Image: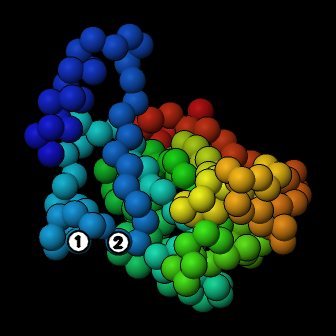
Amino acid sequence: MNCWRHIADAINSTAEPDPTLCWCLNAHYSQNPPSHNALELYPDDAWVDSIGIDACDGYPPSPTKAQFDAQTNAQGGLNHWWNFAQTRNKAMGVGEWGVAAGDGTNGGGDSANYIQWMYDWFTAHAGKGLMYEYYFNNCDPNNVGSNLYRPRSTSCVYLNQGTMGRPRRTMRSGAARTPTSARGSTG
């Protein structure tokens, strides 16, 4: 925590215009601290402008809507961090999300449903403090395998055929992705 605070103080004292510092972590389970409760590492509101999460469909995967909802509401899930951000008047962003076909039994595979469920979550939170979301399109060997459009090659080993058209169709269907300010008011 002290390292974060030191770096935040240094950035805020020299950067123009004022930066937005996002405290971001992985969904579901925290490897650190030993208690696995990431809140023990929170640097405090004075050093954090927004809360972020990376939420790929793995560790554990969400093969059903009931499992997706349960994980979203569990400690470390999307709603857990959303509620944490809201209680502190912080905006939230999802810096990395995607299907996880490359994680073997730890990943949800080529899941168009996961794309839809995330889209629905983004739609429900748009204009209410959701700053951004970015799909993590990766096909590198030994990674999550979230690729939706790059052609396969020796360096691109994953292509999710069942999911590939879903984001474009879903995003064009009309939900607003309203950016918000760092403090949660609509922009």
For disc 2, the neighbor class at 10 Å (few under 14, some 14 to 19, many from 20) is some
Circle 2 SS class: loop
Where is residue 171? Give x, y as percent.
Answer: 81, 53
Residue where numbered disc 2 is placed = 29
Is residue 103 positioned above or below 180 on the image?
below
Q: First in sequence, mark 2 or 1: give its number.
A: 2
- The quarter holding residue 63 reads bottom right
Tell me if residue 74 can be seen: yes
Where is residue 165? Give x, y as percent.
Answer: 87, 60
Residue 14 - label: none
Q: Position of 157 compared to 66: left or right?
A: right
Amino acid type, label 1: His
Q: On the rendered image, what quadrant is the N terminus found in? A: top left
Cβ atoms at labels 2 and 1 below 8 Å apart: yes
Tell me if residue 89 can be seen: no
Residue at x 11%, y 40% (from the top left corner): 2
Where is residue 126? Give x, y as percent.
Answer: 63, 51
Q: On the rendered image, what quadrant is the C terminus found in? A: top right
The residue closer to the viewer here, 146 or 179, is 146
Residue 36 - label: 1
For disc 1, the neighbor class at 10 Å (few under 14, some 14 to 19, many from 20) is few
Residue at x 54%, y 42% (from the top left corner): 131
Residue at x 71%, y 62% (from the top left corner): 158
Residue farthest along the left direction in this orientation? 2
Q: Position of 176 compared to 40: left or right?
A: right
Residue at x 19%, y 25% (from the top left corner): 9
Is residue 95 positioned above or below 81 on the image?
above
Amino acid type, label 2: Tyr
Circle 1 SS class: loop
Q: Position of 146 compared to 95: left or right?
A: right
